[in-house]
Amino acid sequence: MHRLLRAIASPPLGHYHHQRRHRLSAFAADQPIRHHPPIDSAVPWNKLLRDHLAHSRPDLALALYRLMRALSPGLPNSYTLPLALRAAPSMRIASTVHAHALHLGLHAHPDVAGQILAAYARLGRAAEARHVFDALPVRRTTLSWNTLITAYSIGCDPDAARAAFARMVAGGSRPDAVTWTTLLSAHARCGRHLEVLELFRDMHDSGCEGNAEAVAVALSACPYASGTALAKGRAIHAYGFVKGVVHGYMFVTSSLVCMYGKLGEMEEAEKVFQEAREKNAVTWNALITSYAAAGMCNKALDVLAWMEQRGGIVVPNVVSWSAVIGGFASSGNMEQALELFRQMQQHRLPPNVVTSATVLSACADLLALRLGQEVLQAETETTGNHMLITNLYATSGMWEDSKRVRVMTKEAGLRKNPGQSWIEVKNKVFAFTAGNVSLPEAEEIFRVLDDLYSEMEDEKHANV
């Protein structure tokens, strides 16, 4: 190993340069971090960091970075810090590397500042991202604006994303396809579907060509457009076809299948599916989910069986099974839902929260207690599922068992979240939480509710 370290430290000459690169790559990909390059240069360290990230090992990259700083705190340079930031999985680590950049006086370097901004955006820390953005030492580029809008999108703040977009345009920067897609995603992520469609039209009117991702996001919003939903969906389908993104991207195909399926247009959903050149698990699941949602449970089951019989790389996963199970449960065929639940377990596919909650909900009546007990043996520990089985026992008059599950829930550290509801008035969402009277408008809200209750009582007596 001493020879290896000496080779790393020596200047690369001729074929020795290739050998040095090969050894560094092998060291990065295959070796635990027991040894390290010399601390007189950051170059070999940066090469190792880059190789760890290329091999999808951010954990090793961070371990190497920690070792680098422990041996020589001043060694990291403007190439090192962006690599460490790309590996940061949490706010704690990202802010720590940010602090290192401040200590080294490298926080204003364009590459470092850009990666600090990108790390906070990726982690959904919009306030920190905005602070870094405002302090950028160079002229703000379209890339930096896109990164800030991404932070608002991930943080589910479409209003702030739109305000940033407006500032971007006012400042003379030209939005590109990524800008528009990020803005569309910010609204779709928060359920602002009608605004997604308006923005998609604005994008088209601005002369921006858009991209496959923008088409997919717009398609996901179409089912919420009330009476014009199908017309809008077909228009965006045609737009995507003209732009050549319908057959070139599987996620666009999946979005089309979902869109037509949610609108009950199963023939069109089937046609899109059949014409797809390639199909992945998401594409298959889109068709299965569409059939199940349309109440065509046997067709959903047929597609699941067809998917299994193909024996290819794409096989049914827990989402595939959950969709079919949910379809039969919703239609009242609880025995078939449970039989499919058993088959899923025989395939060694552990149920997820959706599967367990679906079957438990379907079993929540007196005659289904036995089925609910069986599902409980396989369910994952979540408060919702514990509450379902608790209520199931109570409905059956088995109070001791109901109490026992409540105790188990408490001992597991699970807590039932307060009930919540929300309404949208003039494009603004108002959320209400059970027991929360701290809203500034609470007194007025309760007064209106009292008036409504009084009117309902009067109406009831008038009809007697």
Image (cartoon, helix red, strand yellow):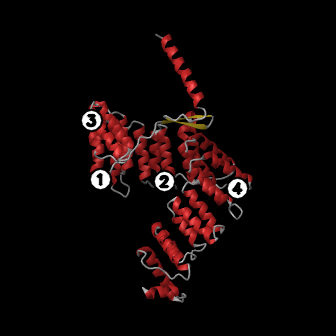
Amino acid type indicated by mark 3: Glu
Q: Which one is earlier in the sequence, the residue at label 4 or at label 1?
A: 4
**Marks 4 & 3, CB-CB < 8 Å contact:** no
- The residue that appears at 47% across and 85% down in the rendered structure is 5
The quadrant in which residue 35 appears is: bottom left
Mark 1 or mark 3: name the one nearer the start of the chain: 1
Q: Which is nearer the N-term, disc 2 or disc 3?
A: 2
Q: Please tell me which residue is depicted at 69% across the width and 51% down the height of the picture.
A: 207
Q: Position of residue 203 (x, y in %)?
A: 65, 48
Residue at the disc numbered 1:
348
Q: Earlier in the sequence, mark 1 or mark 2?
A: 2
Q: Which numbered dot is residue 400?
A: 3
Seen from the viewer's position, the closer of residues 311 and 223 is: 223
Q: Would you call the spot at circle 3 few (<14 residues within 10 Å), some (14-19), or many (20 or more)?
A: few
Image x and y of residue 63, in percent: 47, 70
**Residue denoted by label 4:** 174
Mark 4 or 2: the one toward you: 4
10 Å neighbourhood of mark 4: few (<14), some, or many (≥20)?
some
